[in-house]
Amino acid sequence: MGLKRQKIAKKTISFYKYNFSFRQPFQILIDGTFCQMALKNKIQIKEQMPKYLMGEVQLCTTNCALKELETLGKELYGARIILQKFQSRRCAHLKDPVPASECLLSMLGETNPHNYFVATQDHTVTAGVKKIPGVPLLYIILNTIVLDKPCQTSLDHVKAVSLGEMVSVAQQQSIRSLKEDKGIAQKDGERRGKKRKRKQSNPNPLSCLKKKKKGGPTPPKNTEQGEKKKSVKNKKQKTEGGDNLPAPVVTKA
């Protein structure tokens, strides 16, 4: 194992440890293509993987990867025997198996919460892994296991976290654990589940008033004032009429 290759691997592992909280034992998610290439190049995965990654490892696979090798027949029988020796991680396709490439990518999700390494020779898996931040990629080239350098997606994620634009995976996990300890996560779920009831509001008092009819009869005027005005007018007419009467005639006895 070359000294230069060992130094590069150590630097890459430190990147994932510091920025994505990777810890030993490292979980290595392996598919049939990696086992087939290791068998072809006479690489002992169980022996060489811990030495190369300089730490304890857990080699694992999925039920879909095993089923895929079974369907491919005798040509991959040796790879299937190697893959069967690893731990099987439970996937969401127990009843309806899917292609190994699809299954492995589904195990990673959007953020690789379980901190998996992925060991594969499948170009579909490799392309999908490079779109997810924080996924170390292992493959075999020139009879040796190689840990790929961090992809651009991981570098962009780390840069965004350093600028305060995003929350790191470790911070998300710590926030989630704190919520669970305080019971906040459960309360948030209950609040989302409950529908808000609308409060019964009283009607606007102005809307309860009767509307005035347009063009209706005018209210009658005060009759007392009208009668007073009429009596005063009649008195004036009587006094004026008394002044115009003829003078009485006086006769001599």
Image (spheres, rainbow, N blue to C red):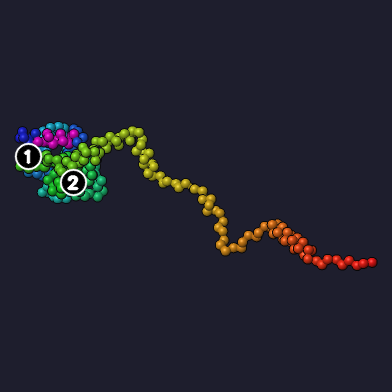
- The residue that disc 2 covers is 131
Q: Residues within 10 Å of mark 2 (few under 14, many from 20)?
A: some
Q: Nearer the viewer, residue 246 or 107?
A: 246
Instruction: Identify which amino acid the numbered label 2 is placed on.
Output: Lys
Q: Residues within 10 Å of mark 1 (few under 14, many from 20)?
A: some
Q: Main secondary structure of the magenta part?
A: helix
Q: Nearer the viewer, residue 241 or 172?
A: 241
Q: Quadrant of the N terminus?
A: top left
Q: Quadrant of the C terminus?
A: bottom right
Q: Residue 80, located in which quarter of the rendered image?
A: top left
Disc on res. 31: none
Is 28 left, or right, of 220 in this rendering? left
Distance between mark 1 and mark 2 Cα atoms: 25 Å
Element on which disc 1 rests: strand
User: Residue at the spot x=65%, y=60% of the render?
Assistant: 220
Element on which disc 2 rests: loop
Tag nearer the camera, 1 or 2: 2
Asked if residue 43 is among those painted magenta in the image, a careful observer would answer: no
Residue 248 percent location from the top left of the image: 85, 66
- Looking at the image, can residue 98 be seen? yes
Q: Nearer the viewer, residue 78 or 215?
A: 215
Q: Residue 142, located in which quarter of the rendered image?
A: top left
Relative to 14, does residue 211 appear above or below in the rendering?
below
- The residue that disc 1 covers is 144
